[in-house]
Image: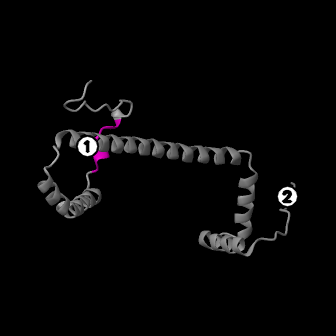
Amino acid sequence: MTAPKKKAQMSVYLDPEVMKTLSAYAARREQPMSFIAEAAIASFLSPDADERREAAIAKRLDQIDRRIARLERDMGISVETLALFVRFWLTTTPPLPEPAAKAARAQAGARYDNFVAALGRRLSQGPKLRQEIPDDVDGVQFRPEPAQGEGK
């Protein structure tokens, strides 16, 4: 019978931080540092290491792509909501006579503060407008109805 091959010994110089990390990991796993180092080198040199790395990168890119798609959707909803509100407000709010306009300007600061407070409550407590809109409207072009007095 032949004796099993003896492992070859090698000296490696490691950065102090890498050595500290290796030592801590080996202690947590209750394994010798040489076993952990050997497994890490084998994993690094294995032919499927590149494939695993590529798969991990592809998975992360897919996640980023989905997040960007959600951001684009949410931004589109926000822009269309603001545009629709501004168009509605401009077409339905008659100009005020001068005495009333002065009074409205005097109250503008307090009304704005109330608006910001209400917006803060809505953002912190929800539900968010984007949650109220179904996902299947992504491909639909948002076209607000023309306001009164506007042509089609």
Amino acid type, mark 2: Lys
At label 2, counting other C-alpha atoms closer than 10 Å, the crowd grade (few under 14, some 14-19, many 20 or more) is: few
Residue at the outermost top position: 152
Does residue 120 sit above or below 49 in this rendering? below
Question: Residue 28 in magenta?
Answer: no
Residue 118, x across and y down, in percent? 22, 59
Name the one closer to the observer, 11 or 139: 139
Quarter the N terminus occupies? bottom right
Q: Which residues are magenta?
A: 128-135
Query: Which quadrant would residue 89 be assigned to in this image?
Result: top left
Q: Residue at x 20, y 30 (%)?
A: 149
Amino acid type, mark 1: Phe
Main SS of residues in magenta: helix
Does residue 22 sit above or below 146 in this rendering? below
Mark 1 secondary-structure assignment: helix
Quarter the C terminus occupies? top left
- Whichever of callouts 1 and 2 sits on the residue coming sooner in the sequence is 2
Image colouring: one colour
Q: Residue at x 47, y 44 (%)?
A: 68
Q: Residue at x 39, y 44 (%)?
A: 75
Residue 6, x across and y down, in percent? 85, 62
Side of 68 where 6 appears, left or right: right
Does residue 126 sit above or below 149 in this rendering? below
Residue holding disc 2: 5
Name the one closer to the observer, 70 or 56: 70
At label 1, counting other C-alpha atoms closer than 10 Å, the crowd grade (few under 14, some 14-19, many 20 or more) is: few
Residue 45, x across and y down, in percent? 76, 52
- State the count of labels: 2
Mark 2 secondary-structure assignment: loop
Residue holding disc 1: 85
